[in-house]
Amino acid sequence: MTFVVTENCIKCKYTDCVDVCPVDCFHEGPNFLVIDPDECIDCTLCEPECPANAIYSEDEVPAGMEQFIQLNAELSKTWPSITEVKDALPDADEWKGKPDKLQHLQK
Ligand code: SF4
Ligand code: F3S
């Protein structure tokens, strides 16, 4: 089991999640974060911290977002680790909750 970052992180990247992870399993891309499923210990701490409600347990990923399970696994292998909170992306509040953000994912 692992936790998974889903679509609503894209173009927001608040990074509150990073602050609570005890095993530093978040990895950072230009406008999205992912969780390494081989490092996540299922502690659940990050899920309530995300202002965009983008984090789910692998078995509770909403319908239509299943592809993010694979995306987290893939991208976490090449993106660098992030262990400290940083400022959210400039228009994060405007993008929070917008649909169909996958097309904006930068790899
Ligand atoms: Fe880190 Fe825990 Fe979230 Fe997994 S569930 S990513 S270990 S904070
Ligand atoms: Fe993304 Fe939420 Fe973390 S927007 S960076 S998953 S706090």
Image (cartoon, helix red, strand yellow):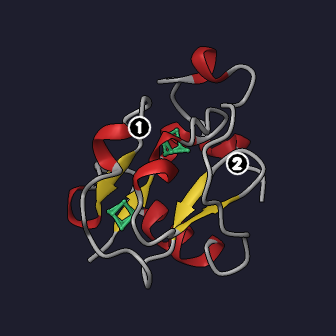
Horizontal side of 46 relative to 52 (left or right) equals left
Farthest-out residue, top: 94
Q: Position of residue 107 (x, y in %)?
A: 77, 60
Q: Position of residue 53 (x, y in %)?
A: 37, 36
Q: Is residue 37 above or below residue 15?
A: below
> Is the residue at mark 1 in contact range of ligand 2, meaning its CB lies under 8 Å from it?
yes
Q: What label does residue 84 carry, if any?
A: none
| Location of mark 2 (residue) | 105
Q: Is residue 36 above or below residue 83?
A: below
Three-letter residue code for mark 2:
Leu
Q: Position of residue 8 (x, y in %)?
A: 50, 37
* Of 71 and 14, the residue lying toward us: 14
Three-letter residue code for mark 1:
Cys
Q: Label 2 neighbourhood size at 10 Å, few (<14), some (14-19), many (20+)?
A: some
Please report the residue visible at 72 percent of the width from the left and 30 percent of the height from the top: 89
Determine the secondary structure under disc 2.
Answer: loop
Which label sits in the foreground, 1 or 2?
A: 1
Q: Tell me the quadrant of ligand 1.
A: bottom left
> Is the residue at mark 2 in contact range of ligand 2, meaning its CB lies under 8 Å from it?
no
Residue 27, located in which quarter of the rendered image?
Answer: bottom right
Q: Label 1 neighbourhood size at 10 Å, few (<14), some (14-19), many (20+)?
A: some
Horizontal side of 64 relative to 16 (left or right) equals left
Please report the residue visible at 24 percent of the width from the left and 57 percent of the height from the top: 44
| Location of mark 1 (residue) | 50
